[in-house]
Image: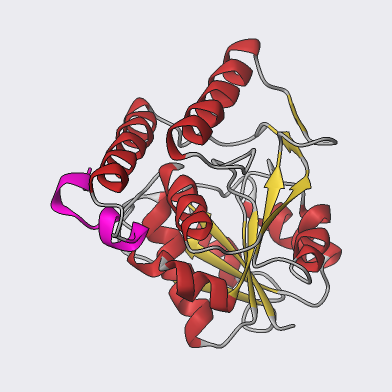
Amino acid sequence: MKTLVVIPTYNEADNVETVIDAVLREAPDVDVLIVDDNSPDGTGMLVTAHPEHQRRLFLLNRPDKDGLGAAYRAGFAWALKREYDVIVQMDADLSHPPAKVPELIDALSTADVAIGSRYVEGGGVANWSARRRFISAAGNAYVRLVLGLTVHDATAGFRAFRSAALRNLGALDSESNGYCFQIENTWRADRIGLRTTEVPITFTDRTSGQSKMSAAIVREALLRVLVWRWHEIRHPQRTPAAISTLEGTRA
């Protein structure tokens, strides 16, 4: 299957060449798209200087930094326009293991969406403090409880989609940014009956660069999840796509 790995970047000059080389090595049949939000540290220039640029590696330059969700939506649109069969999303900071890309792709033989999961048997995290472990586990438990999801790692950012699944769940029309973008796509996929499977991974905290996580990103996720569920209860006939674009759900 024609496959594209979408990697959003902002100031990832320390990591971008390493993650590109690792993905191309571990998954020799895939292409890679870097979606760069005009990084002032020269991330984009490192991509265009790479030997595989315009062969298996491509760069989508965006003029402004306006969130992870917006970057992924732009990357997904680029992929769908070029008729890729499978789209993989992953972080640039090497927290997601490139060696697991082929396993995620293979999992789509029996699923519409494959999630690289920290919270299934065989999965885990490395180099995290006890506080961060608690926040992540509690956040996933909160999302699963409020939205009634069976997926164990609803906030995971390492995923593979069949192209039809991305279209059907309406990922290009989603409203969320931050890691709430991952929750929204999980929720949408669940509600329209897509088959989702989880592949165990070990998530390793970044060693270079700066995390993009913030209090605002966490607040967005906590509030949107409640609002989505409230609208589902009040308007059970509405689809997640309709609910997530209601005026009251915009952050």
| Place of residue 66 in the rendered image (x, y in percent of width and height, measured from the top left) | 31, 52
As drawn, 68 above or below 5: above
Task: Give the residues in magenta.
Answer: 239-251
Q: Quadrant of the C terminus?
A: top left
Residue at horizontal 55%, vertical 78%? 164
| Place of residue 95 in the rendered image (x, y in percent of width and height, measured from the top left) | 68, 40
Quarter assignment of residue 61: bottom left
Residue at horizontal 23%, vertical 45%? 234
Residue at horizontal 59%, vertical 16%? 134
Q: Main secondary structure of the magenta part?
A: helix
List the single residue furthest toward the top: 130
As drawn, 214 above or below 92: above
Q: Mark yes or no: residue 37 visible.
A: no
In the rendered structure, does residue 212 fall within the stretch colored magenta?
no
Residue at horizontal 55%, vertical 48%? 12
In this picture, residue 3 sits left or right of residue 239: right
Q: Mark yes or no: residue 233 visible.
A: yes
Q: Quadrant of the N terminus?
A: bottom right
Considering depth in this image, is 50 or 245 the residue closer to the camera?
A: 245
In the rendered structure, does residue 246 fall within the stretch colored magenta?
yes
In this picture, residue 65 sits left or right of residue 142: left
In this picture, residue 201 sits left or right of residue 77: right
Quarter assignment of residue 51: bottom right
Colour theme? secondary structure
Considering depth in this image, is 18 or 24 the residue closer to the camera?
A: 24
| Place of residue 172 in the rendered image (x, y in percent of width and height, measured from the top left) | 39, 68
Considering depth in this image, is 195 or 62 the residue closer to the camera?
A: 195
How many dots with numbers? 0
| Place of residue 148 in the rendered image (x, y in percent of width and height, measured from the top left) | 50, 39
